[in-house]
Amino acid sequence: MTSTIQPAPNWSLKEEIRAYWSKRAATFDDAFGHRILPGPEHDAWAAVLRERLGPQPIDVLELASGTGEVTKVLLSLGHRVTGIDFSESMIERSRAKHRGHPRARFVLGDAENTMEPEAAYDAVVCRHLVWTLTDPKAALQDWARLLKPGGRLVIFDGDFVNLAWQGRLAKQAMAILERWTTVSSHRDSSLTSEHNAILSRLPFRKGLTFETLSGLVEEVGFTEITRGSYHPIARAQRRIAGRHDWLRTWLHTRFILTARKP
Ligand SMILES: C[S@@+](CC[C@H](N)C(=O)[O-])C[C@H]1O[C@@H](n2cnc3c(N)ncnc32)[C@H](O)[C@@H]1O
């Protein structure tokens, strides 16, 4: 019989988040949408990043670099990349993936308090980090500090709590497929309750929207805030996805927020 071990009250939320992602590191790349596959998917990511970062190689700080998948695209565009992640298992994987690359560096650290020098980077990029932050405002203040004047902030994120009508339809269709075939949800079900317990205590527990995030980004002093569409990436993913993953591309409302430090 298995029993659920409840964390002690002094087990900090951030430690739980770190432990959660560390458990997911080994299989993270197996899930569709995490690994950026060569071909149309990689090309779509590259086009979206080139459009936002420009054609010249620059110094990019990639926050929550995870297993180094977005890093791979940034490196392919010629940028010098510092990846920060607070999970040792994630950092190990990104280091192994990019071992010996002259423009890649990985640091074990907290994305909410990077300790990176002031005005050191031309751009800050992160994918699927902001929804899981414990203190988003402090994080954004830190990111503004370490950017050079004119530096760019590029956030790929989404609302992983509320489903729009397309998401609700996709979820129903996925459940039917799961009932009749061997495909299943990409997250290990034993981690689902852990995920939910963490989510219920996060600032964005009710879902992260572009509107909420852009308000916060503006409050911290960024300008030229724009919303970009995930559609080019989702379209590319649909070209290579099986039925279940094809449906998954419709599940969540995702967005790309771009802003500039004055
Ligand atoms: C959904 S994964 C995304 C990984 C990667 N950005 C990607 O898209 O492939 C979330 C990542 O955020 C990292 N993370 C969460 N909170 C963090 C924090 N405060 N500091 C550093 N890393 C953090 C986790 O360790 C994990 O690697």
Image (spheres, grey):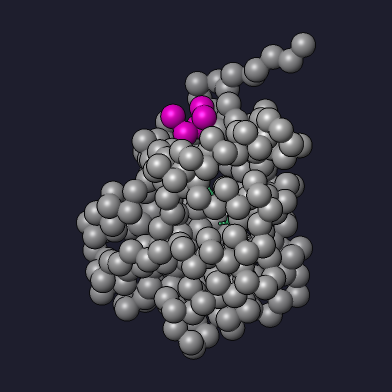
Residue 53 lies, with reference to residue 247, above or below; the image says: below
Q: Measured from the top left, where is residue 108 in percent x and y?
A: 61, 56
Please state if 113 lies on the left or on the right of 90 as rendered.
left
Which quadrant: the N terminus?
A: top right
Q: Position of residue 13 (x, y in %)?
A: 49, 34
User: In this picture, which residue range is highlighted in magenta?
Assistant: 196-200
Q: Residue at position x 66%, y 57% from top? A: 241
Rendered view: 193 above or below 207: above
Q: Position of residue 216 (x, y in %)?
A: 27, 53
What residue is rendered at 64% in x and 46% in y?
Answer: 244
Who's the residue at 69% across and 71% down the image?
38
**Up-down: is 81 above or below 160?**
below
- Residue 198 lies, with reference to residue 158, above or below; the image says above
Q: Quadrant of the C terminus?
A: bottom left
Residue 221 occupies quadrant: bottom left
User: In percent of the image, x 33 and y 58: which residue is there?
Assistant: 141
Q: Is residue 123 magenta?
A: no
Q: Is residue 100 visible?
A: yes
Q: Nearer the viewer, residue 210 or 172?
A: 172
From the viewer's perspective, tell me whether residue 63 is left or right of residue 246.
left
List x then y, in percent, for residue 257. Answer: 37, 62
Q: Main secondary structure of the magenta part?
A: helix
